[in-house]
Amino acid sequence: MVQQLKASRSGTKGHMTRSIGLINGYANKVMNQQEANSLEVLEGKLKGLYETYVIASRDILEKLRASKATQEELDEEQTITLQTQDEILGARAIIKQKKQEWLDDERDRRLLTLFQATNQASNLAANQATKLREDLAEDVEVGNPEPIQEPEEDPNPTTPEQKIDLAVVDATPATEETDDVVEDVEPDATGSVNGPTRRTSLYIFYTAPYTVLRKEKEYEERLYPAQKWVKTQTESISKDSASSAMFWKLFNYISGQNDKKTKVPMTAPVSVFIEPGSGPNCESTFTMAFNVPAAFQDDTPQPTESDVTIEERPEFKVLARTYGGFSNDRVTQQERQNLFDSLAEEDKQLVNQTGPYYYAGYDPPFKLFYRRNEVWMIPQSELNLPLDAESQQHTTVAKPISSCDEKNESDN
């Protein structure tokens, strides 16, 4: 009986040792949220294994005492148990330390987000006050003073803390705060959208120009001119997990981390070029880009970060579908499928249903209503065009979404 108990305890010890090895592997890593969650799962598993181990050790000691084992045998058993307890305590200390480090990093990120949102809101308020004074002075000069229309009070006012979702860092920074959104300017007689503007009740900001070549019921064909975009790239299993780090790299660039130390106006949309990959766990390549405003197209500040580059994006066509709400990985993939399903037969022949595509986001994460998202499918004829001077072409071979789903399900 004692030998059976020792064999059972030995198996449990083996599982614990593997768990401790995984925990030690995290000791020198800067964790993201997914890894922090994995560490928490390991902690729960380790706790359960240890409880099983302790019960087995207690039973072994009782059996040894009942069989009148020697003091040497009892001491040896006690030593094994105490050594294991020390290993467990060491592993749990690592877990506690890494969890605290992650919480500190998360707190710092939230404080940074709040500071930037508050700073931008303050700048917007100052600009509005200046504009209001100028308008008032102009009315007085022409002898036509008009009463200033006070904004209607919100019957359900929200505080900045309520408006800003600090747990979410999406495609755009905190640059607007309104439900009064007017969509991009209508195309002129030639179908061109010139120097597009997107008006809110607070201000107007620049959007990437394009020409509408054809408009269908649920999508439209667009032509984007050759322009510069600032971009960064990463590999990940999902757009949601990849977007935060890429966004802050680009936001730092427009905030002055460039060779001219110049602040570059934020533009819309924030585009994410998604190349479904065939690597482990269906890892894909994500390239996030901000359009460089017209005023900086000729003399573009160069990034100082090695993994942020200026992309000479050539003229290209897309088939674009617009939708509202918040867009996570699942929604984005569903909207891409909806776009493909809505395409005319001749358009379906032009695109790869599971190939590279774009997600485009226009709104900050704390905006609740009238949100604008888009998915763009790219005609195959466009995919041999260079995205930048370094790569000169898209080289990634697309992997069907269904294969990724099947692999993920099998992994689970």
Image (cartoon, rainbow, N blue to C red):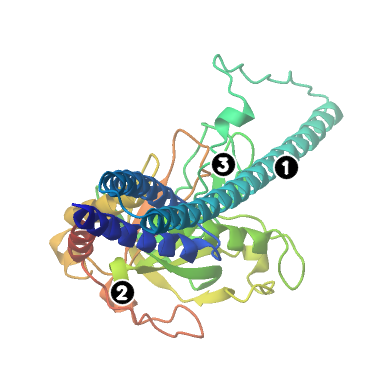
**How many numbered markers are drawn?**
3
Q: Nearer the viewer, residue 31 or 94?
A: 94
Which three-letter amino acid code belongs to the residue tagged 1? Asn
Are dots 1 and 3 in contact, CB under 8 Å?
A: no
User: In the figure, residue 15 lies in which quadrant?
Assistant: bottom left
Q: Is residue 15 left or right of residue 178?
A: left
Q: Residues within 10 Å of mark 3 (few under 14, many from 20)?
A: some
User: Which type of secondary structure does the marked residue at label 2 adopt?
Assistant: loop
Residue 191 visible:
no
User: Which type of secondary structure does the marked residue at label 3 adopt?
Assistant: strand
Disc 2 vs disc 1: which is toward the camera? 2
Q: Nearer the viewer, residue 392 or 129?
A: 392
Vertical side of 162 occupied by 231: above or below: below
Q: Residues within 10 Å of mark 1 (few under 14, many from 20)?
A: some
Q: Residues within 10 Å of mark 2 (few under 14, many from 20)?
A: some
User: In the figure, residue 58 lies in which quadrant?
Assistant: top left
Are dots 2 and 1 in contact, CB under 8 Å?
A: no
Mark 2 to mark 3: distance in Å?
A: 42 Å
Which three-letter amino acid code belongs to the residue tagged 2? Gly
Disc 2 vs disc 3: which is toward the camera? 2
Which numbered disc, 2 or 3, marks the residue that appears first in the sequence?
3
Q: Which residue is mark 2?
A: 279
Q: Nearer the viewer, residue 205 or 404?
A: 404
Which numbered disc, 2 or 1, marks the residue that appears first in the sequence?
1
Mark 1 to mark 3: distance in Å?
A: 21 Å
Q: Which residue is mark 3?
A: 199
On residue 267, the disc is none
Quarter of the picture containing the C terminus is bottom left
Whole-percent x, y for residue 255 in the image: 70, 58
Q: Which residue is mark 1?
A: 119
